[in-house]
Amino acid sequence: MSASAAVRRRPTLTRSRRLLLAIAVVAIGALAAGSLSVWNGAKAQAVEVGTWYNIESRHSGLVLGIRAASTANGAELVQWNANGSTDQQFRFLDSGDGYYRIQARHSNKVVDVASGSTADGALVQQWGDANSTNQQWRVTESGGYATFVNRATGKALDLWEWSTVKGARVSQYTPTGGVNQQWKLVKAG
């Protein structure tokens, strides 16, 4: 067998195959670097940092507030009739990377998952601002309503057991997309 017959030719890549290969290499590199995200239908909520909001439940029509307008660490986040009080007014403080702390106006404390618990139904309370991950929330918007997902736990702010009762607690729960996890941001007047 001659030397020339033993040499195999590699198939040539067509222009379109080279382009697809280049795109695949770039996409794999971006995924590995963490700079490419997969779109899930929700988009980041445009919150105005420093603006005071009432946060209204899509399910019940009631707003978030701090139980009995307490200023103590550990006071529960609950729902109540909107009455204009400052324990029902919250603003967003930028924590970076698309996360925010949610600060109560009356106490200057922030919304916090108690002890960083990862359990469904864990207490959501106010606590002194330490900018810890159990105090940071990603705000996404879909259809005019916001969903808040905790950075430390990956759980959504949830109107516990679909309650429509004044004083019902707010907790965290695995994100379901249910209306009990959807909130309308209304600028406080």
Image (cartoon, rainbow, N blue to C red):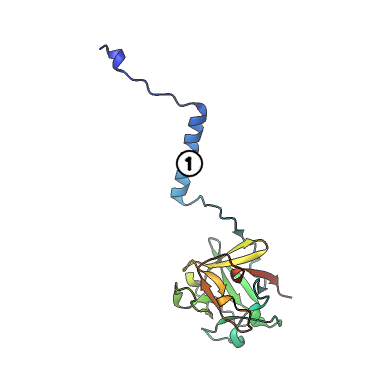
Q: Please, what secondary structure does the residue beneath circle 1 have?
A: helix
User: On the picture, is 51 further left or further right than 28?
Assistant: right
Amino acid type of the residue tagged 1 in the rendering: Val
Viewer-proximal residue among 39 and 176: 176
Viewer-nearest residue: 124 or 96: 124
Image coordinates for residue 124, horizontal then vertical, percent? 52, 77
- Residue 33 percent across, percent down from the top left: 45, 50
Would you say 32 lies left or right of 128 here? left
User: Which image quadrant is residue 13 in?
Assistant: top left
Circle 1 packing at 10 Å, graded few (<14), some (14-19), many (20+), is: few
- Which residue has dot 1 on it? 26
Rendered image quadrant of residue 44: bottom right
Nearer to the camera, 98 or 165: 165
From this view, report whether residue 184 is shown above or below residue 30: below
Q: Quadrant of the C terminus?
A: bottom right
Question: As drawn, is 136 to the left or to the right of 69?
Answer: left
In which quarter of the view is residue 11 placed? top left
Q: Nearer the viewer, residue 176 or 3?
A: 176
* Residue occupying the point 55% across, 82% down: 76
Residue closest to the far left: 1
Q: Is residue 5 left or right of residue 97?
A: left
Q: Would residue 167 be seen by someone viewing this image from the given angle?
A: yes
